[in-house]
Amino acid sequence: MIATAGLIMHFSNQDVAQAMFVAQQQAAKDVLRFIELNINSAYDRQLKDRVEAMFACRGRLKDQARRARSIVVELAGLVDRNILTRAQAQQKAETWLQRIPHECNQLFVFDSRETILIHSDARLIGQSAASMVNLNGKSIGRLMQARHLPAAGDFSVFTWKDNQRRDKRQRLGYFIPFFGWGWTLVAAIDIDDIETDMRRQQNAIVDMLRNTLQKHQTRGETAFLFNGQKQILIAPTAGNGPCEASVNDQTAAACSRIMDRAMAAAHSDAPSLRYREPGASDREMIAFAAYYRSLDWYIVIAGPFETIEKPALSLVKRQSYIIGSIFIVSLLMVFFLIDRLFAPLKRLSAYAMALPDHDFSAPDNHDAEMMLPIADQTDEIGRLANSFQFMQTRLHVNIQQLMATTASRERMKSELNVARKIQMGILPKTFPPFPDIPDLDIYAMIEPAKEVGGDLYDFFFLDDDHLCFCLGDVSDKGVPAALFMVITRTLVKMLAENERSPARIMEQINDILSADNPKTMFVTLIIGILNIRTGHLNWANGGHNPPILADCKGQTRFIKQFSGMVVGAMESIQYIELSLRMRPGDCLLLYTDGVTEAMNAGRQLFGDQRLLATAGRIAKAPVKTGIHDIMEAIHRFVGHAPQSDDIAMMTIRFNGHG
C-alpha cells in the first residue's frame, strides 16, 4: 500500500508536470509559428524584390555587352576588308566603347593573356585581370577567356581589388566572347547596393519581431533572437534572460553555451531545453527553440520552470492527504482480514510443506494425515484446500504413470542397445582385415545418428584375386532402416557367391527388395569387385553419392558415373556395369550422404567441395588416418549441433603392380 501510494504521488506529479509542459510547449509552438509566418512573409517580399532587381540588372548587362560586341564586330569587318589595321581598329574600339552611354559601373575588355585592353577607368588599362576572382576564389581572367565561353556569353559574380581603391565590392558581370581577336568583353555592375538594401529590409524584420516578442513576454517569460554566428539580434528584457546587453566574461561564456544548446535543440526532434539563467537570479528556465534556414536565424522562447512545477506540487500535496487517510482505513481492514484468514492459511502452509515428504510412489494414496478438514468450507479457503487435495491426487496419478513410462523407456533403451551391438557386430571391424595381402589396404567406419542406423558396408574375398565390397544408405533411420540394412548386406553376400557382375547382383537385389516392401523403403548402394592383382575394378552405383578417387599423385576427383536409380524402389530395373583401372597407390573413398549433408548450428552443409578438399589426405596417409582426419573435419564443422544422419565411410587402397 505504501508503494502504491508512492507510485500514485510520483506519477501524479509526473503527469501534471507533463501536462503543464505540453501546454507550455504548445503555447511556445503557436508563438513560434506566428513568428515564422511573419518572417516568411517579410522574407518572401524581400526575396521577390531582390530577384526582380537582379533580373533587371542582368538584362541591362546583357544588352550593354552585346552592343559593345557589335561595335567590335563592325571594326573587325573593316580590318578584314583592309580598310583599317588591327591596331587602328582596336584603338577605335577603345574610343567608342568609352564614349557610348551605358548603365554599368564598368565596361572593359581583356585578351587571352588576361591583359586589360579597354576599360572605362583608364588607370586599369594594361593591368592584369588576374585579381578578378569569383565567389569560390578562382580567377575570372582564366575562367572567362573567350575560348572557354559559349557564344551567347555567361554571367558571374566577382570581386576586383584594383591597385588604387583597394576595394572588394561584389560585382555582377556579363562576359561575352569575340573569338576573332580572342577578346572577352565585360559589362559589370556593383551589386553591393542590392545587398545593402537586403540588410536594411532584414533590420526591418528584426524591428517587427522585437515588437511582436515584447507583447508575448508575460509571467517572467522572455524571448531572444540570434543568427548562426551567435550574434544577438534581439536581446531579452534586461534582467530577464540569459544574454543581457552588458555582461561580464563569465556571463558571456554561459550565454554562448546556452545558444549552442538552443542551436542543437532547434535541429533535433525535441526542440526544448532547460538551463540555469546566468547572473544573480540563477533561475531554472525551460525554453523552446526554432531555426529559420532562409535567414540563418535562431529564436528562443523561455520561461521559469517553477511556473510548471508549482501546480504539480500543489496537486500532489492534496493527494497525499487523501491517500494518507485511505491508507489508515485500509490498514485497519487489513488487520481484520489477516486475523480471519491467518489460521486456515497456516494449516494450508503446513499441508504444502508436508507434501514433499509424502510417498507418491505407493499404489495406495489414502493418507489420513494428509486430509484437510477445512476442505469442507464453502468460501475461498475451502476451494483452495480442495485444490490442494486435487493436486495431491493428480500428483500421485502422474507419478505412477511416469514410473510406468520410465520403466518402458528403460526396457526399450536396453533393447536398442542390444540391437546396436548386434548390428555393429555383423559388420567387419577388424583392421587391417587382410594383413597377409600387401596388395590391398582397407579401412571402414560407421557412426549411426540413433542407437541403430541404416548405413551399411561390407567386404569379402570371392577367390584369391577378387575382392567384393559394398557400401549403402537406407532411406530411413532407426530400427526399420537397421533391419533393411541387414537384409541388403545379406543379399549382397549371398548373391555374390554365384554372380561376378556387380550390375547383375544389384538387379537381383532390387527385384528381391521391391517385391515385398510395404513401406516403400529403398537403399542407395555401391557394389564393386576389385582384381587385387591387376587393379581392374568392375562396379555399379545405384543412386549413391559419387565415390572419390585419390590417385597416386595426390589428386582427388569425383567419379560421377551412375548405373541406375536407387535399389528397392521398383522392380525390373536394368543397371549399367561400370569399370575403372586403379593404379598402384590409388585410393578409392566411398561414403554416405551423412558426410556431405552434415549440418552445423547455422544450418550450413559440409558439402561436396569441402569433402573433396579434405579427402586429399587419404592419398598421403594410411587409410585409417585419412578417414579419421575426414571425421575430425566433420566434427569441427558441425560443432555442438546434433548429428542429422548416419555416417559411413570406407577406403580401399590398391598397392598391387597393376
Image (cartoon, grey):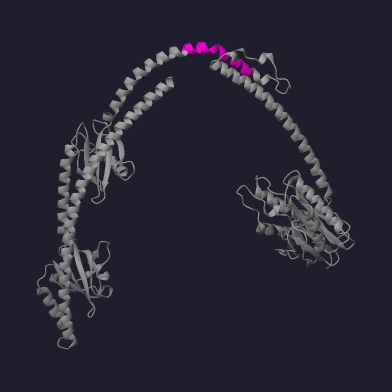
Q: Nearer the viewer, residue 307 or 30?
A: 30
Indicate whether 372 appears above or below 300.
above
Left or right position of 319 against 513: left
| Residue 252 makes an appearance in the image | no
Indicate whether 456 appears above or below 348.
below
Left or right position of 177 against 542: left
Tell me, yes or no, whether the highlighted magenta stretch contains residue 466.
Answer: no
Which residue is at a point 69% across and 59% down the rendered structure image? 612
Which residue is at a point 11% across and 77% down the rendered structure image? 96
Q: Residue furthest right?
A: 464
Horizontal and vertical percent for residue 520? 74, 52
Quarter location, residue 273: top left
Horizontal and vertical percent for residue 649? 75, 54
Horizontal and vertical percent for residue 235? 19, 40
Indicate whether 286 appears above or below 175.
above
Left or right position of 9 against 460: left
Q: Main secondary structure of the magenta part?
A: helix
Magenta extent:
335-353
